[in-house]
């Protein structure tokens, strides 16, 4: 949100998006230099078995849940950008809803470290899915701006808390020296899930209100996907 101001200034000064891209390249370059100054502590990590491509069996269910949250996040953003306009709702709704979601996502970064120490990360992920799913369902039936704002705040917080919970779980399970390939594997999965969710409202001519029903379905599928590996493991046992 803070970067939008300088980006808009570059757009005006340069006259096109090329100046904004050059500005972004400079920021990325500075960030890369700052990363070189990060300390490199010796970390033993967990004892989980990691495949050559970075997969950890214990992360299967949480990864499905986190991917569902990321897909729903992409869907919601593009539903606001495309479906909201198609439905003829006021343009300022986009500002209010998108702003609410982003602001609470930032607040999620503040809340996450203050969660009880005995609260399991898996419980955070499934709790975020259930809470966001209930919110999406209520938004479909009670289609009012106040309800939509409440859902946007829940969705933003759920997405961020779920992401941080999964990363904490990943760091606890992954052995030292394997963080890179484990992180890249799952982050690529989550980025693809975000793109997949975003493509639905971008390509399909859905109504904005119907979008919340689709969102609820996405959360339900993620919940089922989260629970399925554990159910199958119990049956095999």
Image: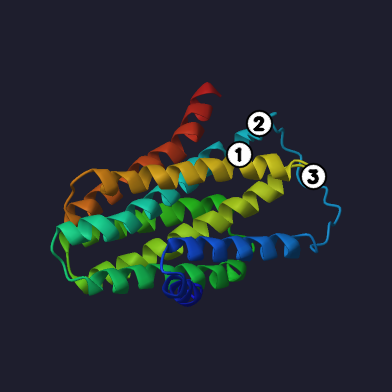
Residue 142 pos. (x, y %): 17, 64
Q: Which residue is mark 2?
A: 53
Can you say whether 167 is above or below 92 in the image? above
Which residue lies at the image location 79% right of the left edge and 62% below the top edge? 38
Q: For the residues marked 3 and 2, what is the alpha-carbon distance in whole angstroms? A: 15 Å
Can you say whether 49 is above or below 125 in the image? above
> Tag 3 or tag 1, which sits nearer the N-term?
3
Query: Is residue 107 left or right of 89 when viewed as pictured?
Result: right
Task: State the image quarter where residue 52 is shown.
Answer: top right
Q: For the residues marked 2 and 1, what is the alpha-carbon distance in whole angstroms? A: 7 Å
> Tag 1 or tag 2, which sits nearer the N-term?
2
Residue 192 pos. (x, y %): 46, 41
Query: Is residue 152 left or right of 171 when viewed as pictured?
Result: left
Residue in front for this viewpoint, 28 or 41 = 28
Say if residue 219 shows up in the picture.
no
Q: Which residue is mark 3?
A: 176
Which residue lies at the image location 45% right of the left edge and 58% below the top edge? 159
Q: Report if the CB atoms under discs 2 and 1 are less than 8 Å apart.
A: yes
Q: Which residue is mark 1?
A: 185
Q: Report if the CB atoms under discs 3 and 2 are less than 8 Å apart.
A: no
């Amino acid at each position: 949100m803070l970067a939008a101001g300088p980006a808009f200034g570059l757009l005006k000064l340069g006259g096109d998006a090329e100046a904004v891209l050059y500005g972004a390249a400079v920021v990325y370059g500075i960030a890369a230099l700052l990363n070189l100054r990060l300390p490199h502590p010796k970390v033993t990590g967990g004892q989980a078995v990691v495949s050559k491509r970075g997969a950890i069996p214990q992360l299967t269910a949480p990864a499905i849940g986190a991917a569902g949250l990321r897909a729903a996040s992409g869907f919601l953003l593009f539903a606001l950008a495309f479906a909201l306009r198609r439905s003829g709702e006021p343009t300022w709704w986009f500002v209010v809803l998108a702003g609410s979601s982003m602001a609470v996502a930032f607040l999620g970064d503040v809340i996450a470290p203050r969660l009880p120490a005995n609260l399991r990360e898996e419980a955070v992920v499934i709790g975020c899915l259930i809470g966001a799913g209930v919110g999406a369902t209520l938004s479909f039936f009670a289609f009012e701006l106040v309800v939509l704002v409440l859902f946007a705040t829940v969705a933003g917080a759920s997405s961020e808390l779920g992401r941080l919970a999964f990363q904490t779980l990943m760091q606890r399970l992954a052995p030292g020296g394997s963080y890179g390939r484990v992180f890249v594997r799952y982050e690529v999965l989550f980025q693809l899930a975000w793109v997949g969710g975003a493509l639905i409202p971008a390509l399909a001519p859905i109504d904005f209100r119907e979008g919340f029903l689709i969102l609820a379905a996405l959360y339900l599928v993620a919940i089922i996907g989260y629970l399925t590996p554990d159910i199958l493991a119990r049956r095999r046992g």
